[in-house]
């Protein structure tokens, strides 16, 4: 309500200022005419004084020059007022009304009328609350429905069974636990893979590497279908303590921030990874697919660098031109990407993270009704899957459409 009150007040003040300027244009000519008459009378008075001999000729000439200068200036002022006020007086008023109506219409189209303000501080507070209270690893694993995997070959299963037996006989064998964790993950037995990888870290003690913790986090995130739990976040933090440049940890932490309503943090991490490369890194395709929308959500004007070797691909001049897009052009580009994501989810479906991105992107674009509709559809699709619903509801809260 405060927003609309201020907006209407400002529009009224602008319209009043424009109308006053038009009114003064007509009044200015009347004032100029009065000044002209005064200066003409002064010229006649000088001529009379010269004829009576009360004013010397040299002084009379100086007086005529000064009065004539003022007369010309008044005449120019009057002509300017006539030019400003010339024409149908209704046309300027119509223009003022159209400008005010256009501003209101533009906000109704690109804004979110009817929704309360959602200041940045409030968004950040909501995001932090969700991050602190989001589902645990165990809750997420219990709720997720992972896609079915093709049945493994019988001889491979036999080898894994032998590995399990060997590790059970020698539970303190780090190499065996590491190998078991890798193969359980390949089979999709993620709880067993997580347990084995935790054992690797426990047995390694202070010698546990960044890759050991990154592998643990990766396995935990695979077990939840892409959701980054608090336990996975802790493993990622331990990874970065040992290797601040670890790509796996930086990618997944960016994903975590995106899932918990902080696209600014997510964008900073993913931008660094994308620009550092290498292009063959496993996280690059995922970043390229989403970083433009992430930048828009973070309020950053950003054009990602082109993929090396792409054809035809933009040249340096085209990339520079794209980087200098106007906000309207950039928003049109983002809107096209959002529409593509929306069409794909409507026809093929997708994970909760994709639905969350769509909801947040629509919120950023000001399409509150559409975001609300997508939120309702996503709740129906993921009914009973608490971890996925938590991600989707966090996105809806960030977009300001959660009820």
Image (tube, helix red, strand yellow):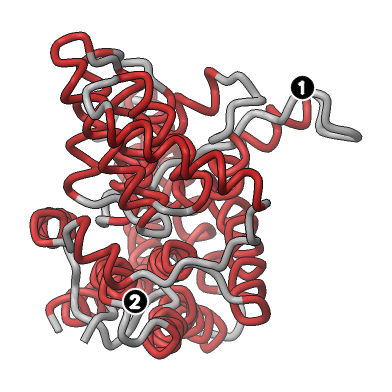
Provide residue 157's location: percent of width, then percent of height.
57, 48
Q: Nearer the viewer, residue 291 or 229?
A: 229
Q: Residue at x 36, y 43 (%)?
A: 193
Provide residue 187's location: percent of width, then percent of height.
51, 50
Residue at numbered disc 1? 316
Earlier-in-chain disc, 2 versus 1: 2
Provide residue 202's location: percent of width, then percent of height.
16, 25
With respect to residue 199, does 156 lie above or below?
below
Q: Is residue 138 left or right of residue 373?
A: left
Q: Residue at x 54, y 49 (%)?
A: 290
Residue at numbered disc 2? 15
Asked if residue 47 can be seen in this view, the reply is no
Circle 2 SS class: helix
Asked if residue 294 can be seen in this view, the reply is yes
Say which quadrant the N terminus sits in: bottom left
Provide residue 77's location: percent of width, then percent of height.
45, 54
- Front disc: 2 or 1: 1
With respect to residue 265, does 103 lie above or below?
below
């Amino acid at each position: 309500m405060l927003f609309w009150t201020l907006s209407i007040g400002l529009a009224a003040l602008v319209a009043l200022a424009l109308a006053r300027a038009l009114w003064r244009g007509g009044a200015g000519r009347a004032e100029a005419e009065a000044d002209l008459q005064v200066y003409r009378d002064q010229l006649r008075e000088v001529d009379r004084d010269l004829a009576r001999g009360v004013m010397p000729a040299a002084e009379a000439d100086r007086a005529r020059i000064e009065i004539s200068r003022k007369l010309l200036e008044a005449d120019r002022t009057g002509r300017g007022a006539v030019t400003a006020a010339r024409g149908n007086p209704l046309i300027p008023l119509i223009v003022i009304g159209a400008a005010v109506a256009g501003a209101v219409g533009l906000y109704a189209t690109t804004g979110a009328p009817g929704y309360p303000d959602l200041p940045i501080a409030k968004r950040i507070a909501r995001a932090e609350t969700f991050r602190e209270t989001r589902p645990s690893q165990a809750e997420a694993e219990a709720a997720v429905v992972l896609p079915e995997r093709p049945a493994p070959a019988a001889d491979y299963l036999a080898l894994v069974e032998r590995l399990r037996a060997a590790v059970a006989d020698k539970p303190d064998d780090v190499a065996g636990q590491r190998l078991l964790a890798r193969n359980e993950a390949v089979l999709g037995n993620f709880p067993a893979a997580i347990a084995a990888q935790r054992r690797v870290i426990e047995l390694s003690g202070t010698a546990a590497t960044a890759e050991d913790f990154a592998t643990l986090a990766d396995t935990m995130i695979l077990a939840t279908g892409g959701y980054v739990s608090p336990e996975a976040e802790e493993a990622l933090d331990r990874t970065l303590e040992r290797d601040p440049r670890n790509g796996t940890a930086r990618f997944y932490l960016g994903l975590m921030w995106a899932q918990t309503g902080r696209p600014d943090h997510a964008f900073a991490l993913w931008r660094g990874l994308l620009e550092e490369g290498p292009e063959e890194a496993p996280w690059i395709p995922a970043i390229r697919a989403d970083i433009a929308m992430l930048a828009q959500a973070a309020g950053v004007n950003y054009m990602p660098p082109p993929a090396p070797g792409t054809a035809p691909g933009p040249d340096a001049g085209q990339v520079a031109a794209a980087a200098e897009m106007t906000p309207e052009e950039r928003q049109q580009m983002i809107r096209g990407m959002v529409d593509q994501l929306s069409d794909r989810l409507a026809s093929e479906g997708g994970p909760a993270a994709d639905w969350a991105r769509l909801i947040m992107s629509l919120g950023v674009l000001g399409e509150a009704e559409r975001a609300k509709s997508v939120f309702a559809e996503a709740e129906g699709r993921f009914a009973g899957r608490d971890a996925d619903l938590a991600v989707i509801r966090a996105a809806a809260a960030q977009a300001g459409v959660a009820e």
